[in-house]
């Protein structure tokens, strides 16, 4: 892909958003089942979307917070693979967490705990900054040019 003039393709953007959102919840589910699923008798969608489970007052709450932070690292990897442009990482990261906020609003109501806002805000920053850094490293790599030397 050449990084010159970009073509406005809304279907590509929507497809990228859907892919990142699906991968986000897939990896969050995997991490939550590893960190939290072993600690609780019944693992439900509450750990995804209910703000009360993100608390620093219990061990399960800390496990949930750890899963969210680990998932933000995975989100940066998704940006590297799917978005590939450093200047788009903040937009896609913010979109990811705004959609997550919307799902939380629908499922469990408005998040009223400061812990939920701090954890998701930090995860947004980690995803955006790390994704941007990874994409920038890829963009700044030298372009290999095969030398065709003609000896006459």
Image (spheres, rainbow, N blue to C red):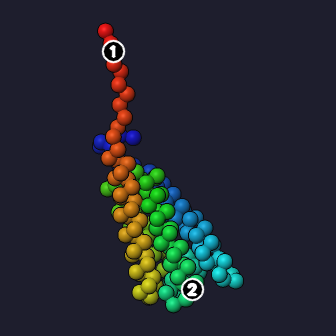
Q: Which residue lies furthest to the bottom in this view?
A: 57
Q: Residue furthest top?
A: 152
* In-front residue for pair 109/86: 86
Q: Determine if residue 28 is in view.
A: yes
* Residue shown at 30% from the left, 42% from the top: 4
* In-front residue for pair 6/126: 126
Element class at badge 2: helix
Q: Specify few, some or many for label 1: CA neighbours under 10 Å numbering under 14, 14-19, or 20 or more.
A: few
Question: x and y percent of residue 15 in the render?
Answer: 48, 54
Is 102 positioned to the left or the right of 6 in the image? right
Q: Which residue lies furthest to the front in this view?
A: 151
Q: Mark 2 points at which residue?
A: 59
Question: x and y percent of residue 65 in the render?
Answer: 50, 78
Q: Name the residue under label 1.
A: 150
Q: Determine if residue 14 is in view.
A: no
Q: Specify few, some or many for label 2: CA neighbours under 10 Å numbering under 14, 14-19, or 20 or more.
A: few
Q: In which quarter of the image is the N terminus?
A: top left
* Residue shown at 55% from the left, 89% from the top: 58
Question: x and y percent of residue 103 in the render?
Answer: 50, 74
Name above or below for residue 17 compared with residue 65: above
* Residue shown at 35% from the left, 44% from the top: 141
């Amino acid at each position: 892909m050449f990084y010159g003039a970009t073509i406005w393709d809304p279907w590509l953007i929507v497809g990228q958003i859907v892919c990142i959102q699906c991968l986000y919840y897939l990896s969050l589910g995997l991490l939550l089942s590893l960190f939290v699923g072993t600690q609780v008798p019944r693992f439900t969608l509450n750990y995804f979307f209910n703000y009360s489970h993100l608390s620093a007052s219990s061990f399960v709450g800390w496990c949930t917070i750890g899963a969210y932070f680990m998932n933000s690292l995975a989100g940066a990897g998704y940006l590297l693979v799917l978005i590939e442009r450093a200047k788009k990482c903040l937009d896609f990261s913010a979109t990811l967490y705004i959609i997550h906020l919307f799902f939380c609003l629908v499922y469990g109501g408005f998040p009223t705990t400061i812990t939920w806002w701090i954890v998701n805000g930090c995860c947004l920053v980690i995803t955006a900054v790390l994704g941007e850094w990874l994409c920038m490293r890829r963009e700044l790599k030298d372009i290999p040019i095969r030398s065709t030397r003609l000896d006459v």
